[in-house]
Image (cartoon, rainbow, N blue to C red):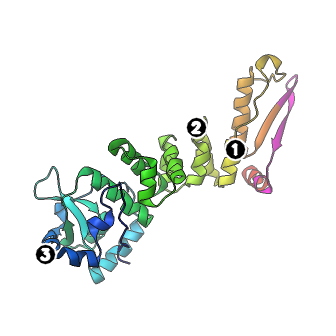
Amino acid sequence: MNDERKPARPVRGLGRGLSALLGDEQGAAEAGAESARERRAVPVERLHRGRFQPRRNFDPEQLTALAESIRAQGILQPLLVRPHPEVPGDYEIVAGERRWRAAQQAQLAEVPVLVRDIGDREAMENALVENVQRHDLNPIEEARGYHRLIEEFGHTQDAIARATGKSRSHIANLLRLLQLPEEVLAMVEDGRLTAGHARPLVGHDAALEIARDAVRYGMSVRQVENVARPRPKLPAPEESRYVIAGASSAADLRALERELETLLGMKAAIADAGEGRGTITLRYANLDQIDEFLRRLR
């Protein structure tokens, strides 16, 4: 299926909006001769990936399907480009990189483009809005796009929410994910974890270890939430009666309990009775945790 988009509504306070830049059939008719002069066919090698494109990953199967559609029908909607700021005579893609990649796969020599004089700010804004409105971005790509709009162009979360049609809490939650270790972010980007898995790990000391286990054992979001949930504080070391080999302090004991929780997916408590004996207590919140515990034992 070809890579068509619905016209986006203009957004106040965030560039001119995609509809003002791309336009639909009515907008093109109103533009008249000026718009016609801006439309042209450009060799694919004269086009370059946009520096502000938030999307990093393109599904190979979807690209192949789009390439087949382009072979049969051509590119029905031109790419939005701007003159390349560093390569005279070439163009930088603002919107439509997926079509450009598929056109190369379909072995097209040139593609239709709409050339506009767009600054860095608008290029970033419109590349993000286009992808968000199409749901083309994974959560980390989307979060990084929002972060760039805030850090580089001074937008507020409220302004971004109005522009993208997302809630402010949605944007705030995504931005919090960027606090996670890079390896965890990579797991979300490539689909091994969802944003739901990652959210309870923000700020957790064992975020990376829990994320690795979640991938290794196929843990559900609820199981990750249970493992990551803060535990009640243990008594101070002088009040603690826990003394076991290799765990000379309450901090060591908590580390062992946390390791057990990560491995078993359940709450764990260790009580030492002295002379190398003691008990390990496991607590479950639902039957799913028991099923997961048995699966791991097998």
Is residue 249 rendered to the left or right of residue 144?
A: right
Q: Badge 1 local density, few (<14 within 10 Å), some, or many (20+)?
A: many
Between the residue at mark 1 and the residue at mark 2, the CA separation in whole angstroms equals 14 Å
Mark 2 vs 3, N-terminal side = 3
- In this view, the residue in front, 192 or 168, is 168
Asked if the residue at tag 2 contacts the one at tag 1, i.e. Cβ–Cβ closer than 8 Å, the answer is no
Q: Is residue 280 above or below residue 10?
A: above
Name the image quarter holding residue 50.
Answer: bottom left
Three-letter amino acid code at the position of disc 1: Val
Three-letter amino acid code at the position of disc 2: Gly
- Is residue 79 one of those drawn in magenta? no
Task: Looking at this view, name the residue that lies furthest to the front.
Answer: 12
Badge 1 marks a residue whose secondary structure is: helix
On residue 154, the disc is none
Q: Which residue is mark 1?
A: 227
Residue at 28 percent across and 66 percent down: it is 20
Q: Badge 2 local density, few (<14 within 10 Å), some, or many (20+)?
A: few
Q: Which residue is mark 3?
A: 33
Q: Which residue is mark 2?
A: 203
Residue at 33 percent across and 58 percent down: it is 127
